[in-house]
Amino acid sequence: MLKSLYIKNYALIDSLEIDFESGFSVITGETGAGKSIVLGALSLMLGQRADVKAIKQGESKCVIEGCFDVSAYDLKDFCEEKGIEYDPDSYIFRREVLSTGKSRAFINDSPVGLNELKELGNQLIDIHSQHQNLLLADTRFQMQVVDTLAGNKSLLKEYQASFHQYKQSQRDLSELREAIRKSKEEEDYLRFQYESLREAALIKGEQEDLETELETLNHTEEIKSSLFRIYNFLSEDDRGIVSELKESLNISSSLSKVFHKSEEISQRLETAYIDLKDLSSDVERLANDIEFNPERLIFIESRLNLIYSLQKKYHLSSISELLNLYEDISRKIENINSSDQQVETLEKEVAAKYEKMLVLARKISDRRIAITGRLEKELVEKVTYLGMPNIRFKCDITTEEPSVYGIDNLLFLFSANKNAPLQPVAGIASGGEISRLMLCLKSMIAGATALPTIIFDEIDTGVSGEIADKMGQVMLDFGKNMQVIAITHLPQIAAKGKNHYKVYKFDNDDSTTTNLIQLSDEERLDEIARMLSGAVVTDAAIQNARSMLGFS
């Protein structure tokens, strides 16, 4: 239940702090006093979109904070699923809106996103505003009512997961068929491409090797001549570098007998001599190996021309890319060859998922059908009590193709008169009739879901007198099991509340502010009398109010 509400710098509210009680409470106030402001602040705290215009003029931010007692409700699984820190006793919601346009949200002082705020808020409180009466025309809302009363929440969640898996498999099958169709349209061209690349027998890295070898063949004479010149410089009999190093080594070795430091010179000369002698042999071998091979030249040029033509043909720049293309074409042809088997496999998968989904859908449908008799009977009884003795109501369920809600099409049919045919409720029910229907449906849903708090914002629209008195009694009755708060203009409903709060507006020379207070018994008597008689409170109104409140 909602234990307390704190509002600061929101709209016309400077600072407001109020505690709420359990059971059935009412909020009253003159038109324009600010009841909608209090409700707007509460909605903002529960995750509604923020607007900087809501900040009181001249202030930098507004703050709305609410404390909820959740000790009677098991929210552990929900909190773990949503990643919200679990507290078995209470939650404090806080929402701050800054004049810069930024908004911050907290649960028990931990920052959270608006989605988490909304989802937990929906578990704690239901705000029924006047526009929600229009939901009665929405077939999805009608289905939610039936599913709530049938206890279909977990089963419906399982079904919807199965439904989405089935639809995904359907899309996969459709995409596969389309891909196969396109592939078969270009099958001849794919096979032509495949053969041209297969016959080319490309090898990764061969292009670079062939281009290097071609460069060598085109400069054979120049390379051979240069290598022999190097060899001659190194190994010419009389003046070659190797011969000169050998002679230097001999001299250094002789010198070592009288000059010990020459040993280091000898070692370095010996190293240079060995290296250059080996180099001379290698150069000579390379020079002898270099031969001009016209047949090899023709082969390399032909091979490179084939590679270049394939690259140009397929707008690619390397053998690696050509090989990737070859693998891609191979896969496409393999898919074409095995397409019938792939389609058959996926068709079986789709059929299996459809059957699994259908089993769950039938279970949900059976439970819906099973609950409709009780729903119709209880709703007729409740609405008859609220002054509609000739009401007839029926849940018309027909079967349709599976959707996210199952295989049922549900329509609430309604007639307020004996001889009038049943018709869709939204088309024929008046405002007062819809208010009474919604109140009864909400009381039934609240009993099935054990919602901690429900707030009715002028659900009494279109009713008065005895009917208003009975609507107040309905709210009082299901307020015995939960916290119910009604914002009302009707004294008959206001008098039924266990607790009475008043919204009022205060004007001074500089500003206008809105406030909310809990009324004492005497103040409550005056408020009910004002609601009965208007601006001038008469003795008769006071006596009537005293009677309505049960004051002696």
Image (cartoon, rainbow, N blue to C red):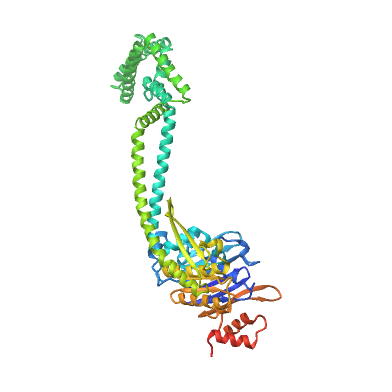
Horizontal side of residue 36 vs 138, given as left or right: right
| 130 to 288, vertically: above or below | below
Residue 114 seen in the current view: yes
| 221 to 324, vertically: above or below | above
Residue nearer the viewer, 302 or 69:
69
Horizontal side of residue 235 vs 16, given as left or right: left
Q: Position of residue 260 (x, y in %)?
A: 30, 25
Task: Report which quarter residue 513 is drawn in.
Answer: bottom right
Residue nearer the viewer, 384 or 138:
384
Residue 522 seen in the current view: no
Q: Position of residue 113 (x, y in %)?
A: 49, 59
| 330 to 30, vertically: above or below | above
Residue nearer the viewer, 398 or 52:
398
Residue placed at 46% from the left, 67% from the top? 124
Q: Position of residue 15 (x, y in %)?
A: 59, 73
Horizontal side of residue 12 vs 89, given as left or right: right
Task: Report which quarter residue 184 is drawn in.
Answer: top left
Task: Report which quarter residue 216 is drawn in.
Answer: top left
